[in-house]
Structures are given as C-alpha cells and as structure tokens.
Amino acid sequence: MKETLLSISSPFGGTVSLCKNSWESGASPDSILSIVSGMHGDQVNGLYINSLLTRFLDGVAANKEPGFKLTGRVQIFPVVNIHAVQSGERLWSFDDLDLDLAFPGNEKGEVAEQITRSLFTHTADSTHAIVLKTAHHHYDDAPHIQLYDPDRPTKRMAECLGLEVVQELSQTPTFKVSLFSHWLENNVHALILSAGKPGALDRALGDSLFGGLVELMIHTGVLSFTQKKKDKTELQIYPVNGQHRIVSSHAGMFIPEVSVGSFLKQGQKLGELREIYSGETLEEYCSPKDGYLVTLRHYPVMFEKEPVATLLTDKKQGFWPF
C-alpha cells in the first residue's frame, strides 16, 4: 500500500513528497524492516531492486506467492530525493544539499531537512533497516555490505544476503549526520548494501540481489516461508585498517586493466594514467597486496590526488568478535 508521509507545496505548482509502500501481517508486528533507496538522484539500482520487492510483496499480500506469508511489517522508501532522481543528478539543484548528510533533519527547517526528518521519524521504530546505494560519483562498487561496529543480530542479518564481502566503516564527522548512523544510535540493526555505479541501471545485478533480500526478510521475521531456509554465507570481514585506497600522483586519463569485484595478486596491475594530449604513460597502479577490488574509478578523467581504487586486503581472522 502506497502512503504519502510528507507533502510540501512548491512555488510553481505541484508538491515535494515523501512516500512509502508498506505491508504487514495485521497484528501488532514484532519485527519491522525498513528499506531505503533513492537518497541520491543518480543511484537507480536501488529503485529497481525496490520495484522487484514491491511486486513480490504485493503478490505475497494477495496470496499469489505460494509458501510465503507476511508475519511482520515491511516498509519500502523507493525514492527519497525525488527531484534529484527526476533530473538524473546526484543532488537536488534547488539547494544542492546531500540528503544523507542532513539527519536527523528538522520538521521546521528547509525542504530537505523536513524530508530527512520525516524519513527518520517513520523508520526510527524499525527493528531492522537497510540502505540501498551505489558507489560515489565517478566510481563503481562490487556488491558488498557495509557495517559499523555490528552486534551479533546484525551479523546474522548480513549473512542472509548471499554476499561474502563486508567492509567495516569508520566513524567520520559526516558519518554522524547520516541516516545509517542515526539508526544505529536508535538501536536499529542496520546495514548498507552498496552495488554498481551511479547513473546506470544494472538489471542483472539487481536481479541477483533480490533473492538475498527476500532471505533477509525471512530471517528478520517479517516474512515466513514453508520451505527450508537457504544456508547462510560465511562473511569475509575487512576492518578499516585492512582497506587500501590507491591515489593518483598526477592528473590525466585513467585506463583500467581489471574489473571491480576481482581478487588481485600483489603487484598485479590495476591500470595506468596517461597524459591526455600526448598519450604518455604518467604512472601505473599495482595492487600493494593480495586483495579484493571493491571500488574502482570508471570515469577516466582524473585530477591529481584523486582516488583510483579501494582494495580490501587484510580480513579478520577467526571468529567474529561479539
């Protein structure tokens, strides 16, 4: 069921709205799962994934998905920054404010602050929550999970998605004003699922992630299924000090020689930077250790000291520290 949570009149007619789709079992739910996408206007993979989930959950509610039954509440926020999505730009040009740096928001503030306040208010009572995102502008992310100081239930939640790679996040000043951070402060079991590049729809990628999200719904108790659950995936956790960012020393055109999502050997060449006018090779980039290439620049034109890639190299050994 679609529900409008916030509607603000615009100066030239029409409105700025925040909407959600929701489904629940009817009884007071013990489990509430919130899934958010479209925080930035150029992140369209999450919109596609949420469209698949919406169609599936509509089928469950109509008893058209054999074996599945709603046992809690699921609420999906497909598009948060709707005007940015309509224009295909990362930020809404009206105020150029990054919505994910505007939490917990302000119900009496600017339009963007009212949107973020409404979103946080309607997700703060969640037991579990997910942000669907893509890589930052100019980059491509291999599908992976991002966590910060997770507890055991959050780890179990991550295991359901079918993705092996987990990147631990550090607490930066911008982290503290994100939706994810405020969920954690509100004791919500939350994670971020990042996959793909901005401004591009990867249907095959979205289709592959859909099944894991359904498994997560079953695990969190918002959905039941009569058949045996799938085995959980063993996670490969890479702490903050096991992440290496490779940065350019010159400006030029980046020519990659590997694909994001690859496991690289120490010394393996990632690509090279060429001078745009002459074609001369300015520098080559090689893997500092054996590792997993989680992020790679896809836009070729680079300034000096910009990141080229992020490599995950030193995963945690032994058991997860509970």
Image (cartoon, rainbow, N blue to C red):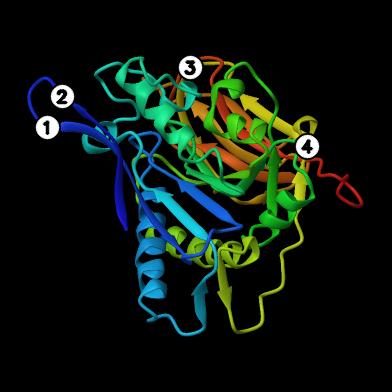
Point out residue 218 in the picture as x, y percentages from the top left corner: 60, 68
- Of the image marks 2 and 3, the number of the one nearer the N terminus: 2
The amino acid type, in three-letter code, at marker 4 is Pro
Please provide percent x and percent y for residue 23: 42, 61
Q: How much space separates mark 2 and mark 1, taking CA atoms?
A: 6 Å
Q: Which mark is residue 239?
A: 4
Instruction: Return the disc, 1 or 4, that comes first in the chain's sequence.
Output: 1
The answer to whether residue 260 is visible is no
Tags 2 and 3 touching, CB below 8 Å = no
- Give the residue drawn at x 39%, y 80%: 63
Q: Which mark is residue 10?
A: 2
Callout 1 amino acid: Gly
| Mark 1 to mark 3 CA distance (whole Å) | 44 Å
Q: Residues within 10 Å of mark 2 (few under 14, many from 20)?
A: few
List the residue tagged with mark 1: 14
Q: Residue furthest front?
A: 27
Q: Is residue 317 above or below residue 181?
A: below
Q: Please tell me whether mark 1 or mark 3 is closer to you in this view.
A: 1
Instruction: Work out whether mark 1 precedes mark 3 in sequence or the reverse, and give the earlier one.
Output: 1
Q: What residue sits right under mark 3 in the picture?
A: 251
Q: Look at 26% across and 20% down and name the residue there.
A: 93
Q: Residue furthest left?
A: 12
